[in-house]
Image (cartoon, rainbow, N blue to C red):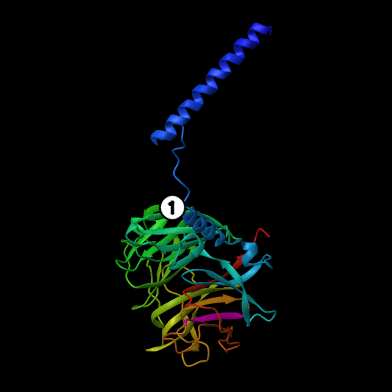
Amino acid sequence: MNNDDNQQLKTRLTVFVTFTLSVCFLLSLTGCDSETESTSAPIDMAVADMEVIEDMRVTTIDDRCPDARAGVQILVLYPDRVEAFAQDDVGFRVSKSCTFIAQTEQGAEGATGMAISPEGRFFIVVPEGEEGGSIYIYSNNGEFERKVGPNINLKDASRIWAVDNGFAVWISRNGNLYHLNNDGEFDGSYTPPQQGSSRLRNITDMEYIGEDNDGNHRLLVLFSDQAPQLFAFPNSPIFDGMSAATAVATIETPVGKKLLVSGVVEGTTRGVGQYRHVTSGRMAPNYESTLVYETDNGYGDGKDIVSFEDGFFVLDTGGDGARSPSLNSFNTSGIPQEPNPLNVEGTPIELVRTLIFGGF
């Protein structure tokens, strides 16, 4: 570059700087806003701080269960969380292991039911007001995967159960049953096997028994105002021995799955009855015996029941508050073993015994 070129460049720069300073000086005198001023909204620090606080509320499974390892535990559902309880070496005493799922961290404030998929994932149903109900899905390690919904058809959803090829959700308000696929997505009405309608009143529990030798599905349904019924080909028989029922669990035996049912036995007395295994849909299995009576220590209100190799546990929600919620154990003969107060806040809804932390 020669001297003439240098002189021209200096002249242009001087003119540009002088012009820019003049514009800025005029703008300052008139109070006008520069067109080049940023138009982005100012940051609300209070909102930003709240977002940080909200993020801090979301825990990880390492936070909640630092000693997690693969094994079978009893899971108790509460409206805002799922607590895990581990059995001792003998099996009849339990103690809190950790908070397995904290669904309230995902906005699930009032869960009403929980079901487990065949691969071990957890599906929690949550009513969410006028918009309907949603399904919150968690891995076998207690990690949040996704939310499905809300769906208006699931408004006031009361319970959820794993059934053939997916899940059944029941709406107590109108008695409707709906079907979800294996991913928790709404799939229309659900009609139990050999049933002409998707509407059933006063359901308390369900147990999918599996298929018969011809591939027909079998579903046991419990009611608060009538005897249990096995919906199965060809007769869908009604059970003898109980006039109403609350919860059911199965016991694996060499001859098949026997049934433990909590409910009304022998007239108006409550307790736990045992039935023989289901063989077909032609006739109901025989009522074998009453294992527990409501006067026995540990039955309480018999809200739910779960079995294991040497006996079973009965969930007592505490009824009207006169008792502490507890998970009390009995041996296979129905003899009380260990009272197990849960010693955690809130009223339990239901329970399940299953393998968790399968990925650990």
The magenta span reads: 311-317
Q: Quadrant of residue 157?
A: bottom left
Q: Is residue 208 magenta?
A: no
Residue 55 in picture, x, y percent from top left: 54, 57
Residue 74 in picture, x, y percent from top left: 58, 73
Q: Is residue 316 magenta?
A: yes
Between 240 and 242, the one nearer to me in the picture? 242
Between 170 and 264, the one nearer to me in the picture? 170
Residue drawn where x is 57% and y is 19% of the image: 14
Residue drawn where x is 47% and y is 81% of the image: 317
Count of numbered circles on the image: 1
Residue 212 showing in the rendered view: no
Q: Secondary structure at mark 1?
A: loop
The type of residue carrying mark 1 is Glu
Q: Which is the main secondary structure of the residues drawn in magenta?
A: strand
Residue drawn where x is 63% and y is 69% of the image: 72
Between 134 and 170, the one nearer to me in the picture? 134
Residue that carries the numbered disc 1 in the rendered image: 185
In the image, farthest residue toward the bottom: 295
Q: Quadrant of residue 133?
A: bottom left
Residue drawn where x is 61% and y is 15% of the image: 10
What is the crowding at mark 1: few (fewer than 14 residues within 10 Å), some, or many (at least 20)? Answer: some
Specify the quadrant that holds the N terminus. Answer: top right
Please state if 242 lies on the left or on the right of 358 as rendered: left
Residue 86 in picture, x, y percent from top left: 63, 75
Specify the quadrant that holds the C terminus. Answer: bottom right
Please state if 262 lies on the left or on the right of 66 as rendered: left
Residue 227 showing in the rendered view: yes
Please state if 19 lies on the left or on the right of 360 as rendered: left
Q: Is residue 206 above or below residue 299?
A: above
Residue 35 in picture, x, y percent from top left: 43, 31
